[in-house]
Amino acid sequence: MTILSYQGDATLADLLHADGIDRSVVAIRDLIAGVNAAPDGELPDAWLDLVSARRSDATSEQLTALRATIGRPADPARGDHAARLANLRAELKCRGLDGFVVPRADEYQGEYVPLRGSRLAWISGFTGSAGAVVVLLDKAAIFIDGRYTIQARQEVSGALFSYHHLIEEFHGDWAALNLPAGAKLGFDPRMHTAAWADKMRASLSPAGVELVATNGSPVDAVWTDQPPAPLGVVNIQPLSAAGRSASDKRADIGDALARLKADVAVLTQPDSIAWLLNVRGADVPCTPLPLSFATIRADGNVDWFVDRRKLAPGLEEHLGNQVSIRSPDELAGALDRLGVDGAKVRLDGGTAALWVVERLASAGARLDQGGDPCVLPKAVKNQTEIEGARAAHRRDGAALVRFLCWFDAEAPKGEMDELTVVEKLHKARQGAADFRGPSFETISGAGPNGAIVHYRATPATNRRIENNSVFLLDSGGQYLDGTTDITRTLAVGDVGPQARRHFTLVLKGHIALNRARFPAGTAGSQLDTLARQFLWQQGLDYDHGTGHGIGSYLSVHEGPQKFTKEPSLTALQPGMILSNEPGYYAPGSHGIRIENLELVVSVNIAGAEQPMLGFETLSLCPIDHRMIDPNLLTGEEQDWLNAYHARVRSELTPLLGGEDSAWLERATAEL
C-alpha cells in the first residue's frame, strides 16, 4: 500500500463515522502507539483489522498515514547512558536505595522482550538475550555469559560499567563485596523469580546487605519515553494447524488439575496460554505469542488477562463463553481472591515472577509449585501438528536449497558478508507459503565469528566471507504449520584438513544420536553422550546442550525435553521434537555445528521386550560433502549420510526447478 499524507484528525474522524466505526481518533492514536511498539512481522497491515475489519480503502489509507506520522519508538539501546545512569541513581536516592538490579527479563520471563521491557538495553546499551546490570550509587557492573563477551564490550561503555562473567561471578556476590553493611539493594519482584531472590539473599545477607523489593521499577520512573505495551495482533490458530480444539485442551488441563486436587492453575508463560487457547500473537520478535497471563480452573474455565484491543475480529467467538477476557490490571485482584478463597493453586515456581508467588501466598492461597500443567502436553505434538511440522520443513528445505545454490556461486568471489547472507536467506524464506518470520535471529558466522556460539552479526562485527574458510549458518523459520531450526556449516573453497576433521567428528556424533534406539522412559540427558563421544575420544567437547525442544508455530526453544549433560527427569515421548546439534568451536579460527530437528517416534524391534523409541529427522537440507573427511566415517555412517541425502533429494526436488534442482542433485550425490 502506498502511504499517502495524513489529512488530519478531522478527516479521519469523518471517514470512521462514514464507515460506521465507533472509535475516537484519540483511542486510535493510543492503539497505533501500541502497534508500533510491536514487531511488524510479515503482515505489516494486519493491525488495521484491530480498528475494524469493515473499513473503506480511504480509511485504511488514512490509518496507515497516521501510523507513519506517529512513528516507531526509539531504539532503547541508543542514547546517553551516562545521563540515564545519573537519573536512575537520583531516583534510587529518593527511594532510599543504595543500588538496583536490572535484569534482561521482563514480567513474563520469556526468551524475547518487547521494546517496553528492554530495560537492560536502555540502561546499558547491551542487546544480548541474557545478562544483568547492578547499578550502585558510585559504580555499575554488567554481567554476561561467554556468548556475549565480545558483544558486551562493543555495546557497553567500559567507562560506565565493569564487565563480569554471569556464570563465573554471581552478581549478588559482586554487590555484597561492593556495598557496605546496612545497604539496601533494590529489585523489581515482577522481573525476577523466587529462586533468584533466594540466591541473592544468600549472597547479600552475610555482608549485612538487605534485598528490597520495589513497588514498580525505578528504571520505568526515569525512562520518560518508554514505549507502551505492545499491541501485536492476536489471531486464531485454526484447528487445521492446531489439531485439537481449545475446548478439548481446556477440559484436559482441568482434568489434570482435578487429579492433582488443585482448584486452579496460574499460567505465567505466554506460550502455554497461546497453546491452550489456540491463539497466536505478535508482541515480541521471532515468537508468535501474545504477552498475557491466565488462570484455568479445574472445570476448564479460563480468565485471560490480556489487552482486548489487540484481539482480532472473531477471536472472542472462537474462545467461547468459558473464557473470560480480563484487563491485565485485574490480575492482582484475581490473585488476591484466590487467596481469600483458600484455593489450592498450581503454578511453575521456576518461571513465575516472585511477585505472583508472594501475592498468592500473602493472600492465603495454598501453593503447589510443581509446574505449568500445559508444558508437557504442549511438548507432545498431536498428529496434525506432526504433519504440519513435516510440511513446514519441506518448504523450509526448498527455501534453503535456493539460498545455498546462490551462496555456492557467490561466496567464492569474496564480495559477500555476514549481513548480506542474513538478508538473502530471509528473502528466500519469504518465498515459502505461510512464512511468518524468523524463529530466531540468524547466526551468520564467517571464519572466527563462527566460533562464537550465539554470535549475531551487527554492522560493527560484520565480517567478509573469505575464500578457503568455514562459514556457520544457524537459522529458522516460523510457519503457520510449524517452526524450524537448522544449522549447516559450509565450506567456502578449501577449508583444510583440521576443519574437515573437526566437522567429521561432529557429524559422527550427530549420526549416532539420530540412530539411537532407546526404551520408553529414557530422558534426553541419557542420550547426550552419544553426540559427544567422538569428540571426547580426541579430547574435545562443546560448551552447550546438544538439543532443545521445539514448539509448533511457537517458541523455537521449548521445554521440558532436551539433550544436555545436566540430569533431566523428563522422559522422551513420541510426538516430542528436539534439535540434534553437536558442535565444535576453535577460537580465532572456525565454528562447526550440524543441526537437524528430530521427531521422537515409536520403533518396532524384533524380539524387543519393552516399548522402544527412536528419531525421525524432520530437517531437509544437504550436509556439505566438502567439509567431510570420508576416511573418518564407517561404512554404516556413510550409508546413513547417503540415505539421508537421497531422502532430501526425493522430497525437495518436486519443489524446485532449473539451477536449484541441478545444485541439489550435486549436493546430495553419494559420498
Image: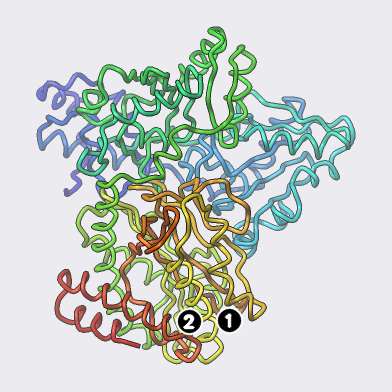
Q: Please tell me in which quadrant of the rendered image residue 88 appears.
A: top right
Give whichever of 226, 86 is nearer the camera.
226
Percent position of residue 171, x then y: 74, 46
Q: Nearer the viewer, residue 302 or 38?
A: 302
Residue 391 drawn above or below residue 357: below
Q: Quadrant of the C terminus?
A: bottom left
Where does the image place residue 661, in percent across and percent down from the top left? 19, 79
* Mark 1, residue position: 589
Whole-percent x, y for residue 60 in the image: 16, 37
Residue 264 screen position, x and y as percent: 47, 19
Q: Residue at x 59, y 73 (%)?
A: 533
Horizontal arrangement in the rendering, residue 339 relative to residue 577 (left or right): right
Could you tell me which residue is drawn at 65 percent across and 43 percent down? Answer: 83
90, 323: nearer the viewer: 323
Is the residue 257 above or below the residue 59 in the image?
above
Dot 1 falls on a residue whose secondary structure is loop
Nearer-N-terminus badge (1/2): 2
> Judging from the image, what secondary structure is the residue with disc 2 in?
strand
Report the disc number at residue 238.
Answer: none
Q: Pointer 1 and pointer 2: residues touching (CB < 8 Å)?
A: yes
Q: Residues within 10 Å of mark 2 (few under 14, many from 20)?
A: many
Q: Residue at x 64, y 81 (%)?
A: 538
In the rendered image, the vertical position of residue 332 relative to residue 31, given as above or below: above
The residue lying at 53 percent from left, 52 percent from top is 523
Disc 2 marks a residue whose amino acid type is Val
Q: Which residue is mark 2?
A: 470
Classed neighbour count for the residue bearing mark 1: other residues with Cα under 10 Å, few (<14), some (14–19), many (≥20): some
Image side of residue 309 versus residue 291, left or right: left
Residue 436 appears in view: no
User: Which one is in front, 275 or 34?
Assistant: 275
Give the residue type at disc 1.
Ser
Q: CA distance from mark 1 to mark 2?
A: 8 Å
